Amino acid sequence: MRHLGALLFLLGGLGALADVCEVPEVDSKLVERLGQRLLPWMNWLSLEHLNPSIYVGLRLSSLQAGAREAFYLHILKLNYQQRLLGLAVDDDSSNNQAKPSMGQLALYLMALRANCEFVGGRKGDRLVSQLKRFLEDEKRAIGSNHKGHPRTSYYQYGLGILALCVHQKRLHDSVVGKLLYAVKHDQHLQQDRLSVDTVAMAGLAFICLEQSNLNPNQRHRITQAISTVRQKILKAQTSEGHFGNVYSTPLALQLLMNSSMPGEKLGRACLKARAALLASMQDGAFKNVLIISQLLPVLNGKSYVDLISPDCEAPRVLLQPAVETPSQTQELISVMLKVPHALQPYRHRISVPAGSSLEDVLKKAQELTGFTYETRNSLSGPFLTSVMGKEAGEREFWQLLQAPNTPLLEGIADYTPKDGQTIELRLVSW
């Protein structure tokens, strides 16, 4: 009888797991190698390179950077408060630097919460007010008839709501309503290049609002939106197991890990995604620090929603810098670089060492031929703003493609071209 009871308990446990999303433990060495990729970035302390997402990702992971982590948060506070609040700084040239964007401010507030801090006091209230103003400006840009567009994106809009929510800061129902409408009418989200990321970020914001009960008048719509987001993400799973693509999967899993639904579909989908992620990690696919910082919490069973009540005493393993082994190969590869639609069309074959990034190809082209380009730093790394004298206008971007028409999923700093490839830079609208 006792054995029968144990069997029923086990079956009951399996049934309970079937309708939730769980990501079983991944080899700690693989996780450590991911974390090690963040360490060099924590040495770049200028405002243009500071990335609050790195701090958030580490604090929600099973890894820590020791004293370097605390110092990084200290530098984040100095820079963000100086830039956003107009405080006096020692560097005379610093006034020429741009203020952090809405998304950067949102991630900074999340970094404070990851350290178990609530924003408060005069400085904290001013930061909250700035983020609320950002969102009000975006709401006005979308318009009362929902026919406009955010000046940034719905991704940043959802991120801003999430950041205020984890600090228990209430937003007007009309601000939340714009995101609810966008999720319900998904033609408004197809303007973003990574719609799975956008929908997942919106869903995380809604789950936080639901758990915190900050907009009770919108509760029914929020609950419906969470269900809608979950279904959209599950529908976007590829045959390999990724949600959308390999780089949108971490945020999608953060959303799904906070979900449940009848049957076994959710559990199976998450196990399939875990297998796909594991294969991608083993292949070294994750180089971008923003994506790594979104993936590390997932591998620790955490999500941004955990910032509502973070566990700042949880044990974490101290990261050691990776030991670099110098490359022995001097092999050169040849890459065709093509810009068909610009003020000056361009087509040249460029030779670079094997393992070079696309950014290395652009630099070599600039050095040896008449190629010109400009970039701007972002939390995801440098992105192109101008190519061959042609600047991307409002709601335009320079798309990276493997010719003829395969969009690259990585940016110029992360993508590694292969010998014989043709890479096209194409100006497109969104």
Image: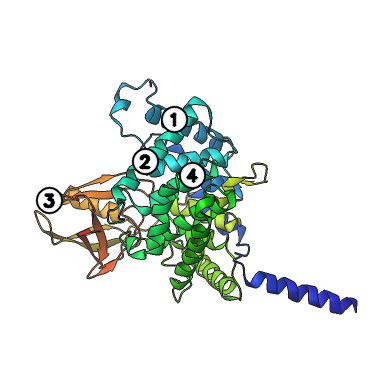
Counting from the top left corner in percent of width and height, residue 331 is at 31, 61
Q: Quadrant of residue 47?
A: top left
* Label 4 to label 3: alpha-carbon separation: 44 Å
Counting from the top left corner in percent of width and height, residue 152 is at 32, 48
Residue 327 visible in rendering: no
Q: Secondary structure at mark 1?
A: helix
Residue 394 horizontal side relative to residue 260, left or right: left
Residue 132 horizontal side relative to residue 370, left or right: right
Residues under numbered marks 4 and 1 in contact, where contact means CB atoms less than 8 Å apart: no
Vertical position of residue 28 compared to residue 71: above or below: below
Q: Earlier in the sequence, mark 4 or mark 1?
A: 1
Q: Quadrant of residue 79?
A: top left
Question: Badge 3, how many Cα within 10 Å: few under 14, some, many 20+?
Answer: few
Question: Which kind of residue does numbered mark 2 sit on?
Answer: Phe
Q: Earlier in the sequence, mark 4 or mark 2?
A: 2
Name the front one of labels 4 and 3. Answer: 4
Counting from the top left corner in percent of width and height, residue 209 is at 53, 51
Q: Residue at x 57, y 45 (%)?
A: 59
* Label 4 to label 1: alpha-carbon separation: 15 Å
Q: How many marks?
A: 4
Residue that mark 4 sits on: 163
Q: Earlier in the sequence, mark 2 or mark 3?
A: 2
Name the front one of labels 4 and 2. Answer: 2
* Label 4 to label 2: alpha-carbon separation: 13 Å
Q: Secondary structure at mark 3?
A: loop
The disc placed on residue 370 is 3
